Image: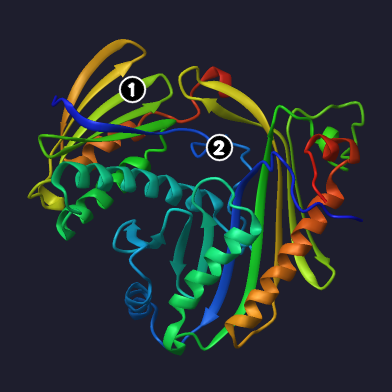
Amino acid sequence: MEIPKKISPDRIKESFVEVRYESQIPFSALVGIFYSHLDSTYTYTNRGDGAAPVFMFYNEKIKIELNAGIIVFNCLNEYLSWPVYKYEIEKALIQLTKNDVIDKYFRIGIRYVSEYPNMDIQELCKFNFSFGLPDIKSDTVLFRSDFKFEGYRAILNLVHMLPHVINDDEQEIVPITKIDIDIIDDNDSKTLEEILIRMDNIHNKEKELFFSLLKDDFLKTLNPVY
Amino acid sequence: MATPAINIFIDERPENVRFNQTGCYVSFAQDYSTVSNIHTSMLNKRFIRLYTAASNQFKEIYGTSPKLNIKETFERSIDKVIKTHPDAISIELTSEKSLFFTVKKEEYTFFLQYYYEDVEEDDDEAIMTIYKNQEKQPSYAGKLDNTVSKIKQIPTYNSPKNQW
């Protein structure tokens, strides 16, 4: 199928990119090394109690969360588009991994969550769900599938009309439908160049699966640009 | 209560997502997902927004970034307040060297003032005024931990609109 380069609105709520790595340096020391490597456009902060702090860096566009052996990127505000977002990830990774502090990269995951207020999942998605009582119409559906997808592991979460509060003043509760796609590559890489290529490939699979799920009529409403 | 200084920052939707009992972002045992706890990640985003707002207001007032001890006090207090899982939250820096939080949760509004200058975690002070709808409730003063525990006592899923 032909995959759009852009849709508008994109409805992307979360856009996680996770890189898992191996290092001989203890994580507590690595946080300090990362701090010294990053330029002054990044702000360091941490939250949580002493037992389980969350170490974070952020600039105007992205945030970076550090856990032992895991670096997680996410757009700080609205989605940036993949070329801009990937540039931000690459820029941060080049700085973080200076002086060969990382020995090996292995798993990479990209997870996008898109949200559609007040929309029936069957209007936007090729999805059917029924069980032993076919006359029942579910108010809310939560569906999770974990499967192999062209050499990658995919985890698909579909949510139909889950109520969320969207207006604080009125306490307005609106049912939200979500498409949550997680594509995971479990291979190993030694170099940053390799993982950047792998990221592009995973992102392409993410798009492929996402657009395969959408109904043609609904896709047309998103103003696709090919 | 002190008069808020400048630049009110309000953290609203879409980050402020409420999860009901059947929320999709539950933790699966040994979850293989990228970002196994998406809720924590969203909480971190909210934390960064509030922390950035407080730091920027500090720079505007004092012309410099907060020193390490004040930075840590900001981080610690913001973390404690966002863990009350409010529907909406705003932060302001006051001229009395305090952080002024406005927290909305269900039908309650909490105005929480926390003094950040020269405080130790074990010896801090917060003052909280509470409204239920428009009706004033008894105020509360004490350590920040005890004060936020009052907010936590408000059940998140209490609203009749949110019973499923």
Q: Chain of mark 2?
A: B
Q: Is residue A104 at all visible to an observer of this figure?
A: yes
- Looking at the image, the residue that sits furthest to the top is B135
Label 1, on which residue? Answer: B109
Can you say which quadrant of the picture contains the C terminus of chain B? top right
Decide: few, some or many residues near mark 2? Use Cα within 10 Å; few <14, some 14-19, many ≥20: some
Identify the residue at horizontal 75%, vertical 29% (top origin). A119
Identify the residue at horizontal 22%, vertical 54% (top origin). B71
Q: Chain of mark 1?
A: B
Identify the residue at horizontal 19%, vertical 28% (top origin). B4
Decide: few, some or many residues near mark 1? Use Cα within 10 Å; few <14, some 14-19, many ≥20: many
Amino acid identity at mark 2? Phe
Residue B18, relative to residue B48: is it above or below? above
The lab-note entry on whether marks 2 and 1 share a chain reads yes
Q: Position of residue B33 (x, y in %)?
A: 64, 61
Q: Is residue B164 at all visible to an observer of this figure?
A: no
Q: State which tag comes first along the sequence, 2 or 1.
A: 2
The image quadrant of residue B5 is top left
The image quadrant of residue A85 is bottom right
Identify the residue at horizontal 38%, vertical 26% (top origin). B104
**Dot 1: what SS?**
strand
- Looking at the image, the residue that sits furthest to the left is B118
CB-based contact (under 8 Å), mark 2 and mark 1: no
Residue B64 falls left or right of residue A206:
left
Amino acid identity at mark 1? Thr
Residue A111 is labelled as none
Residue A167 falls left or right of residue A205:
left
Residue B19 is labelled as 2
**Dot 2: what SS?**
loop
